[in-house]
Image (cartoon, helix red, strand yellow):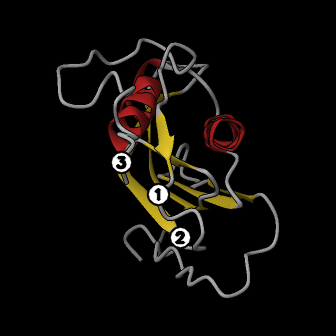
Amino acid sequence: MSENIYKDLKQLGGAAQIPQTPEEALLERVANPQADVQYNVRFTAPEFTSLCPMTGQPDFAHLVIDYVPGQWLVESKSLKLYLTSFRNHGAFHEDCTISIARRLVGFLEPEWLRIGGYWYPRGGIPIDVFWQTGAMPEGVWIPDQGVPPYRGRG
């Protein structure tokens, strides 16, 4: 590939500040050099943190994001900084999970995307949030997300 698809990246390869809010976070993308092939990309964030909008107490989740890219790939450092920006953000589990998925879909225009938000218990009840853009593409290996249901001490 003669064109440098990485030349416009601003955060990779240097120090970058954690955005104060998800809205401030700069997601970056690069052209998909394998756009002629359908394949799955998985990002796992086992230590995702946000804040309860009512109490300000931290909430914790294990996020799994799968997507079949189209013309764009998300740059992983920008995704990490975006996800980290939620640690100062107050929102319910459902809002955080779906907001992340919708922003990625709008930014990347993937062929398919799903997110699993496996939230640790709040008030004794774990809340899991799942969303996908449509049916899984045929012929693409997309493994199970591999996160067992919450069992506590059981």
Circle number at residue 33: 1
Instruction: Please give the name of the residue rendered at 64% of the width and 57% of the height, measured from the top-left corner.
Output: 70
Which residue ends up furthest to the right in the rendered image? 134
At label 1, counting other C-alpha atoms closer than 10 Å, the crowd grade (few under 14, some 14-19, many 20 or more) is: few
Identify the residue under disc 2: 40
Identify the residue under disc 3: 2
Q: Which quadrant, please, contains the C terminus?
A: bottom left
Q: Position of residue 77 (x, y in %)?
A: 32, 37
| Image-based side of 47 in relation to 98, left or right | left
Query: Depth check: 94 or 80 in front?
Result: 80
Instruction: Give the CA distance from mark 2 to mark 1.
Output: 14 Å
Q: Where is residue 111 in the image (x, y as percent from the top left)?
A: 71, 60
Image quarter for residue 13? top left
The answer to whether residue 116 is above or below residue 71 is below
Query: Depth check: 39 or 149 in front?
Result: 39
Q: Which amino acid does label 1 sit on?
A: Pro
